[in-house]
């Protein structure tokens, strides 16, 4: 689909974009040969396997008046293509534009995740917080803000966002890890240990949970347990960010076993 992008740009320059776009949307139609109007679901469906194609679809759709939905899909394609910063800026703008509050809350959550991907937890915290002004009880937004809060100096808010814990079973282990990390940063190690033990109990091979349990164990003076958790992280996901952090923690532990 990279060729589609260059073809489209050439068409725009030479004034032939409408014919190209019409042909593309017919080609993207269902198998019965009927042309289908572009929509968000069709654009997003391309993202996992063909982010280039999703971006091209969004670009073409936007040129035909796709508006906010086309811009949203285009921004999400940018995340998949490795440009989360520009995506986050676009998504934040869309979230603050007039429109359906529920859709804007979803977009604010997407902006927050894009800022996280860009390594900017402070902006992620703000974007998720804005989403929560539109939909205060959304568990996904609370999770995103809590994670960003832990990373940006708002540990107390992270605990508040995850207390009580989300009812959704698919979110519970993740929420326990994040809240344990927040408790640890607040110096409440016993509460952190309770949460992280519960998280590992639910997801014994989750590398984020094992990494955090190793940190908590180290803080409690259980250096053997910490080392075991971090070695397990390396074995389970050797190329992951968590494995890199486990290696750093192990190096510090070997250099200064008494370090907190």
Image (spheres, grey):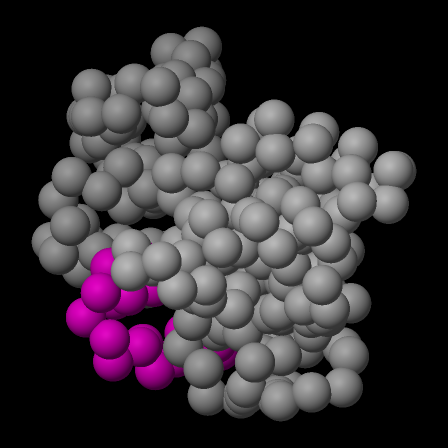
202 to the left or right of 210 = left
Farthest residue toward the top?
255
Say if residue 151 shows up in the picture: no
Q: Residue 258: give x, y in percent of width and height.
A: 41, 24
Q: How many labels does the image show?
A: 0
140 to the left or right of 16 = left
Identify whether 216 is placed above or below 130. above
Residue 161 is one of the magenta-drawn residues: yes
Q: Which of 109 and 98 is in front in this view?
A: 98
Residue drawn at x 79%, y 45% is: 16
Instruction: Please identify the quarter of the rendering in which residue 65 is found.
Output: bottom right
Residue drawn at x 43%, y 71% is: 140
Residue drawn at x 69%, y 87% is: 99
250 to the left or right of 206 = right
Residue 131 is one of the magenta-drawn residues: no
Identify whether 76 is placed above or below 230. below
Residue drawn at x 49%, y 55% is: 26
Q: Residue 71: give x, y in percent of width and height.
A: 68, 61
Q: Residue 55: give x, y in percent of width and height.
A: 60, 45
Q: Which of 65 and 134 is in front in this view?
A: 65
Say if residue 211 shows up in the picture: yes
State the extent of the magenta-drawn residues as a range. 159-175
Identify whether 49 is placed above or below 158. above
Identify whether 207 is placed above or below 46. above
Q: Residue 2: give x, y in percent of width and height.
A: 59, 28
């Amino acid at each position: 689909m990279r060729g589609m992008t260059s073809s489209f740009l050439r068409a725009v320059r030479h004034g032939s974009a409408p014919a190209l776009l019409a042909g593309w949307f017919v080609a993207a139609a269902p198998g019965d040969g009927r042309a289908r109007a572009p929509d968000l679901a069709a654009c997003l469906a391309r993202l996992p396997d063909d982010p280039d194609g999703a971006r091209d679809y969004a670009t073409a759709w936007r040129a035909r008046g796709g508006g906010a939905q086309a811009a949203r899909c285009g921004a999400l394609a940018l995340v998949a293509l490795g440009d989360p910063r520009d995506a986050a800026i676009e998504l934040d703008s869309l979230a603050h534009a007039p429109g359906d509050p529920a859709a804007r809350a979803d977009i604010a959550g997407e902006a927050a995740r894009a800022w996280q991907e860009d390594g900017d937890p402070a902006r992620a915290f703000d974007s998720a917080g804005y989403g929560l002004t539109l939909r205060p009880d959304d568990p996904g937004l609370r999770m995103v803000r809590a994670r960003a809060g832990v990373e940006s100096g708002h540990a107390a808010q992270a605990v508040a966002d995850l207390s009580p814990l989300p009812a959704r079973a698919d979110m519970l282990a993740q929420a326990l890890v994040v809240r344990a990390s927040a408790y640890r940063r607040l110096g409440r190690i016993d509460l952190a240990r309770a949460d992280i033990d519960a998280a590992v109990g639910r997801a014994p091979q989750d590398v984020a949970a094992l990494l955090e349990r190793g940190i908590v164990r180290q803080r409690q003076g259980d250096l053997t347990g910490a080392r075991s958790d971090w070695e397990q992280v390396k074995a389970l996901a050797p190329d992951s960010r968590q494995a890199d952090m486990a290696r750093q923690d192990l190096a510090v532990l070997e250099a200064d076993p008494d370090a907190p």
